[in-house]
Amino acid sequence: MVSMRDGVRLRTDIFYPEGGGTYPTLVHRYPYSPHDGTMSMFARLIAGQGYAVVVQSTRGRYGSEGVFNPLQSDVEDGYDTVEWAAAESWSNGRVGMYGTSFAGITQWLAAIAGPPHLVCIAPTVAPWDVAHGGFYHSPGILAVGLATIWNAQMTVYEAESRGATPPIPVFAEGERMMEAGGLGDSEMRAKLFAMQPEAARALIDHRPLRDIPEFREFAAWFREWCGHSDARDSYWQRISASAHAANIALPVLHIAGWHDYFTKGNLDAFSTLTHFADAGVQRQQRLVVGPWNHSTMQLRPDPGANAGTFFDFSPEGPTMRFFSHYLKGELPDYEQEPPVHLYVMGENTWREEKEWPLARTVWTPYYLRAEGRLTPDAPRVEDPDYFTYDPAHPAPGPIAQGAVYGDAVDLDALPEREDVLVYETEPFDRPVEITGPVTVELWAASDAPSTDFTASLVEVFEDGTTVLLCQGIVRTSHDGIPSVPGAAYRYEIDLVATSVLLGAGHRLRLDLSSSIYPTFELNPNTGKRITESAETAVAAQTVFHDSVHPSRLILPIIPR
């Protein structure tokens, strides 16, 4: 039980090699069950390589004292834990941090505080700014499915720790499975993820969203999340590593997945620290991006057998090589190695690169054209396309990006919807590599004071098989200024990024709409948010594609 500065004690499990001595130390902080079947297994594996390993339950969780309020105390608690670990008899004073998802975010929060003995961090599939690329995917737009299902999970222990009955039985059953080691068993983990979406649906559809009854007592912070939609709000800035980037002077191993729901947060962190930090810090950034979703699975019909997993703590894997260099002083030529390690889907190969985005990228526009075409040729005079967006009948998406919860969407059915515009290339006559950030520059109008526009990039195989590559969303009034009804505006939709080799005969399809639900928060078209109001309105949407309004997809094509 490790004391924090305010006297609150946190449950902390310690693993270290047999035989005594002092060791470089790795800290892992998270709010989940320490019996989940993965953390002790990984801690033992790491300790066997000559490290002391600290696995800590965050404040108010699983034996730790205090009140759980996600992330709000983890700047200070992260600092205190690192400095405590550095002073222990089994530590040599050199401390790193590791972990995935929430345990990646806690690394960034500790880095904000700048503990003197923190040498390096390795945040894996984790954003450095939870309000932009995290629980809020884009400015003003909650990743509503993810945020809701995660908070539903949090209610279980919160209720049990107070002697109350968990409010959502399915999630209580999931928690029992985790306590039995479910995350360490692939079959049990798959069952765990498959059972939750249906139970979460009623929560996600509650209006106003901020008033979900099951959250009132055991996830009260969710209402605060809903009330702070601006990433620039001090509520988020205090726990945003992005806002404190100038003070983060650490070697960082950034590990991401092309189909993960936190990809944007990973890539933004790497890009910022390699472009705007001082030269020494720039050289100490490493990026690994694999073909994974948040449960380390591949989603393509042609998966690669060589993809591995981001849970790789083998001595030869990227994570432990990183710690070998920065915590043990081994691998003297490590900083001369290429800093970027990417998996090219379709070709199913790993490749080393010198930078991100790649310097040799040819930024290639594909223009939206009449009759659903997507071509390199710019339009001249063409009529716009129209659709109607009704928030009561949104275009479907999975609970979270990457279809983690076994709720993948039928991509083939989307073009049949009247609220989805589809633009498609001709089949490529040769293989084409797309590696890098993907953007849609959209000229559009709406009769609503506030609405959303979404874009999904889909690969279409020769046999018609489809796979989602990347997607994004923009809110027309995220800056608080309502749009002028009927006026044409230029919007930039960030589809994040991908890396794929499109085979000869493959096509690209761009789906445009105003919703991908419940992946992203619905816009009710009223000027309010679904977090605060149940009222909705139907919006008439216009998409322009002419010489004055050249809507286009910008692809990062890599010459071969």
Image (cartoon, grey):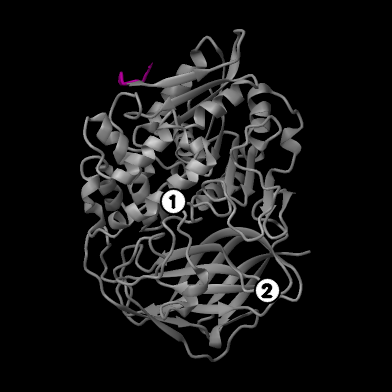
- Residue at 57% x, 89% y: name it: 380
18 vs 417, left or right, is right
Q: Which residues are magenta?
A: 1-8
Sort mark 2 into few (<14), some (14-19) or many (20+) by Cα contacts within 10 Å. few
Q: Is residue 441 visible?
A: yes
Magenta span dominant secondary structure: loop
Is residue 3 found inside the magenta-colored segment of the image?
yes
Residue type marked 1: Ala
The Cα–Cα distance between marks 1 and 2, rounded to whole angstroms, is: 30 Å
Which residue is drawn at the image coordinates 62% and 8% (left, top)? 19
* Comparing labels 1 and 2, the label whose residue is closer to the camera: 1
Residue occupied by mark 2: 462
User: How busy is the neighbourhood of tag 1: few (under 14 within 10 Å), some, or many (20 plus)?
Assistant: some
Q: Is residue 96 in sight in this rendering? A: no
The image position of residue 303, as x and y in percent, is 66, 55
Q: How many marks?
A: 2
Work out whether mark 1 precedes mark 2 in sequence or the reverse, and give the earlier one: 1
Residue 185 lies in the magenta stretch: no
Task: Determine which of the numbered discs, if any, sits on residue 194 in the image.
Answer: 1
* Res 315 quadrant in image: top right
On screen, residue 337 versus residue 326, left or right, reads: right
Rendering coords of residue 336 (x, y %): 75, 37
Indicate whether 193 appears above or below 313. Answer: below
